Image (cartoon, rainbow, N blue to C red):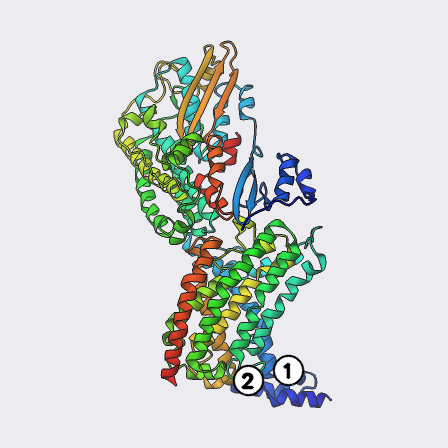
Amino acid sequence: MLEEILEIFRSNMMDIPILKPIILKLEGVPVLNLIVSLIFWRPFFAVIIIPGLISLVLYLLYIVWFERKLTARVQWRVGPLEVSRPIRGAIQALADGLRYFFQEAIVHVDAHRPYFIQLPILAFIPVLLPILFIPAGAVVGIRTPYSVQLIVAFIALIPLTIIAIGWASNSRFAYIGSVREAFMYFGYEIPLIISVMAMILVYGTGDAYAIVKKQSILGIFLNPIAFLVYIVSMLMATSRLPFEIPEADQEIAFGPFVEYSGILFGLVMVIAYEKLYLMALLFVILFLGGWSGPVIPTLGDLLPPIWLFVKTVVVISILVIVRSIYARYRLDQALRIGWTSLLGASVLSLILGIIVGVWLG
Amino acid sequence: MDEYRVDVPVKPPQEFRSYFIPVPPEFVEDVYRSDDYLVLVGPQHPGSGHMRLIVRVKGDIIQEVLPDPGYVHRGVEKIAENRLYIQNIPLVERPSIMDAANFNLGYVRAIEDALDIEVPERAKYLRTILAELCRIGTHLYDAAILAVFMGHTTGFMYPFGIREIVCECLVRMTGARFTSSFIIPGGVRRDVDEKTLRYVYYATLAIANRLKSFERIFINNPTVIARLKDVGVLTRSEAIKFGLVGPFLRASGVEYDVRSVEPYEVYDELTWDIPVSDDGDGYARFLVRVNEINQSLSIIRQCITRIPDGRVISEQIIENGKEIRGNFFDVYSDLVLPPGEYTTVTEAARGLVLFSLISDGESNVPYRLRVVTPGWLYLRGFMESLKGERLADLQAIYGSFGYFPPEADR
């Protein structure tokens, strides 16, 4: 039976010329060969390593540190430094995570206990599901011609878990935060979906492979309005300033997450960052040519995932500077932006998308 | 849609009794019967300071706010009755440590008023410089708090960075970062040399320079203007009715400044404007204080260029040209004021501060010290301006008033 499993893995292995001698040598060893062929099995590699779970964790550790460091540079400060001086405090986020892990997670009396504890963990489901459909070259979990639509649909599920978290917390500020999250959800979701639709019209398909192949001119230049709408919707969707309204810590003390502590707080706080990662992956595929980039032949199948990841991280690293520039809008102002100018711009981008789509054929 | 009242049996949550909230139970029941909602902001809330705000909201609109101050009440007035007059100087600075020199000045002027002490010119100039430095520091501090209340962390860090220059000036002049107790009855503790004054002069230029980058990132920021404009508006008549003071009164269009109405120290010899705005909203309250920083910088520069030579302590306090150093307790420990009540009004950074000193003419401690701080005076106007605004605006209005609970509670 082991042989059959091994055969399944080997039938869809990644082709990496530079690692080939090592893999061939390891395949002679009885147990190791199973592990090695599992790691380099394409679906597994996509979901767990790049652009999946491990790169997600690496990205989280990097972006929390980088955001703090960048904000500090803007604000005449140094930022995190003391945790690991030789690398400028780069493992600060890891240290914070460890601290959260050993802190007591308090469940208060009024909370709906089962939901309160399981919802932060359940929130990972809509985060990890889209990764199945995000392709990176030959590395893909599930290959489907509707990948972009599926990714958008799964991303749209994330606010539901946040609203449920607020409901399970059963506190005043959590209640207000949940209501704000629901309002914001309606504010950005429609322009976001319309801008993605505009890009699907430009390319004539929702298949990520066809989209990347068609981008001899980058998507940004094909439909700049959709690009702008997507960026603003991305800021709104991930509660980043100036739209950090559901979690406004000075107003409603982190809103839906007010009652969480310990590792549960650590889990709920990274939901927004994970969502940002997913939306940036989709952004790179739609607007920045996806995994295409300069080819290094020796890396083979490993190269497209790396390009996708690097592009995503660069996009997010540019986006995090808004934290040090803007103040927070009020809920009604953000909704007004979402329902008027953003919605209007998204409809414009749809019209432009149809024109460009016809022109591209 | 019309509203109609339905009498349903409601039971307010237990916490409203167990938290010792100073509202009658009928009020809570009335809120729960109607379509309203009671939000307790503070005293552990990140955006409330050391006070509790009992906010009654209908949907997202604030109907009424009841303040519950007193969490940092330290009984300054009562403690003052058991201390020597000179020992009270560090005490009266404590309510508002950022604004120490103005509070110190108000108290000391009450003593000088009682003893009829004429202060030397050089000491007057030094006192004015100190008072204006503390005013700049307080305004920067309040701007920083306003920024962080709106989630603008850069707007929080820049003023605190600029404030370091002010603190450095105070360190070089007095030896302490803010609560320096430098102003004493009859003058100041020590003379300040020419080099230090020149440092302060250049520091004002540096502050003006750095304020420009603060203006770019925060004051002219569209999100900041969107949050503060037309929020928490108090008209001219309302501002007078609710007894606002200081920059908040001037932001509503009333040109009243104690420094020009009843000049003390050297304010009548200098040229400066009173920044006034007619809008009365949160942004006007903020801009008036930003303009006051510029005026204060100009006042400090004028003081340094005009400062005369001479003694810094009055002849009536210590004779024969001696210094106060080394003779401090000989001079001040048996200070007894003639019987009567002595009141001074001073323009502190957040507004008018009143010191009223009552002496029985026999003891070397005050019979009664009354301190009315600006925070306490404009609390009513602050609460009134919140009505009809959104819940998210509570922090923006709070920041625009720069309400400082330790100062109000004393």
Which mark sits nearer the N-terminus, 2 or 1?
A: 2
Check the picture and name the quadrant holding the N terminus of chain A. bottom right
Compared to residue B161, the image places residue B302 above or below, namely above
Q: Which of B83 and B358 is in front in this view?
A: B358
A193 and A127: which is toward the camera: A193
Image x and y of residue B276, in percent: 33, 36
Tell me what residue is drawn at x 35 percent, y 15 percent.
B315
Q: Mark 1 points at which residue?
A: A38
Going by the image, does A87 lie left or right of B319? right
Name the residue: 48% across, 20% down: B86
Where, quadrant-wise, is the C terminus of chain A in this rendering?
Answer: bottom left
Q: Is residue B355 above or below residue B384?
A: above
Q: Position of residue A97 (x, y in %)?
A: 60, 60
Q: Left or right: where does residue B383 sit relative to residue A6? A: left
Which class describes the residues within 10 Å of circle 2: few (<14), some (14-19), or many (20+)? few
* Residue at disc 2, secondary structure: helix
Q: In this rendering, does residue B171 appear at all?
A: yes
Query: Rounded to the nearest whole Å, what is the CA distance between mark 2 and mark 1?
Result: 15 Å
Residue where numbered disc 2 is placed: A19
C-beta proximity under 8 Å, tags 2 and 1: no
> Which chain is mark 2 on?
A
